[in-house]
Image: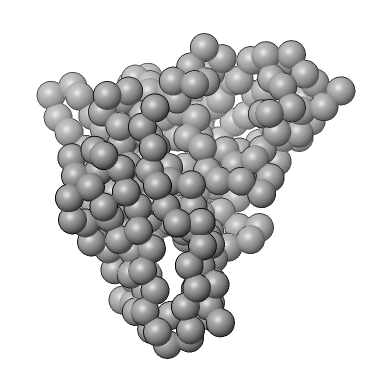
Amino acid sequence: SYELTQPPSVSVSPGQTASITCSGDKLGDEYVCWYQQKPGQSPVLVIYQDYKRPSGIPERFSGSKSGNTATLTISGAQAMDEAAYYCQAWDSSTTSVVFGGGTKLTVL
Amino acid sequence: QVQLQESGPGLVKPSETLSLNCAVSGYSISSGYYWGWIRQPPGKGLEWIGSIFHSGNTYYNPSLKSRVTMSVDTSKNQFSLKLSSVTAADTAAYYCARQGYYGSGGYYSVGYSDYWGQGTLVTVSS
């Protein structure tokens, strides 16, 4: 089955830049989106269509994609950004939505 | 403001059918978008269950397809999930969400989920 691979954890110091990657062998063919999930809360969409930011999401969140790897970048990370982040894409071969395994971002 | 609210039993016995509803307010299901179910076992990641369009067109997770049925009731502006023959492995928080889609000509790919319900924990236990 199609898999999206994310690093299990990423650490960043406050004010620095955090990058979270998502790789999949067909990622270049489909749009990628990213969610932030804090403990006990529902996921929140932070990036869609590879790089677009929904209304209300801070500008420090940005998305990019090169080939089969997508990257979520948090510029000037804040303590409030500490959360799990999930990438998601469509698998056309099985007509299904696929999530990455998630990345725990620690800001310290 | 679009809002989604899951409802259903919090405890289901093994081998029985899990049934959940998702009531949508602030947006008409008939106006577009796919409507999906996503679950998350305790301490684990997100798993897509399936998505449905207001016309009834569905996409299901291949690993769950044999046990999943989704339906939509446009008159009540809600959609539902049934998952049969449940086991302890189906214990999870279940979320409903509004989902954007891409494509034309009858083939669509489901994309981002921009509005989510608060989630409901379903435990499978005797």
Quadrant (top left/top right/bottom left/bottom right) for the C terminus of chain B: top right
> In the image, residue B78 lies at what x, y percent?
51, 32
Please tell me in which quadrant of the rendered image residue B81 appears: top right
Colour mapping used in the image: one colour
Image vertical order of residue B83 relative to residue B110, above or below? above
For image coordinates 50% across by 73% down, the residue present is A11
For image coordinates 70% across by 41% down, the residue present is B121
Q: Residue furthest bottom?
A: A15
For image coordinates 49% across by 52% down, the residue present is A102
> In the image, residue A65 lies at what x, y percent?
21, 56
Quadrant (top left/top right/bottom left/bottom right) for the N terminus of chain B: bottom left
Q: Is residue A18 left or right of residue A105?
A: left
Number of marks in the rendered image: 0
Image vertical order of residue B84 relative to residue A101, above or below? above
Res. B37 visible in picture: yes
Res. B28 visible in picture: no
Please tell me in which quadrant of the rendered image residue A70 appears: bottom left
Q: Is residue B83 left or right of residue B55?
A: right
Image vertical order of residue B37 relative to residue B14, above or below? below
> In the image, residue A104 lies at what x, y percent?
53, 62
Q: Residue furthest right?
A: B126
> In the image, residue B94 lies at what x, y percent?
61, 38
Task: Decide which of B32, A47 is in the foreground and name it.
Answer: A47
Q: Residue furthest left?
A: B105
For image coordinates 74% across by 27% down, the residue present is B88
Task: Decide which of B80, A58 is in the foreground and name it.
Answer: A58
Image vertical order of residue B56 relative to residue B36, above or below? above
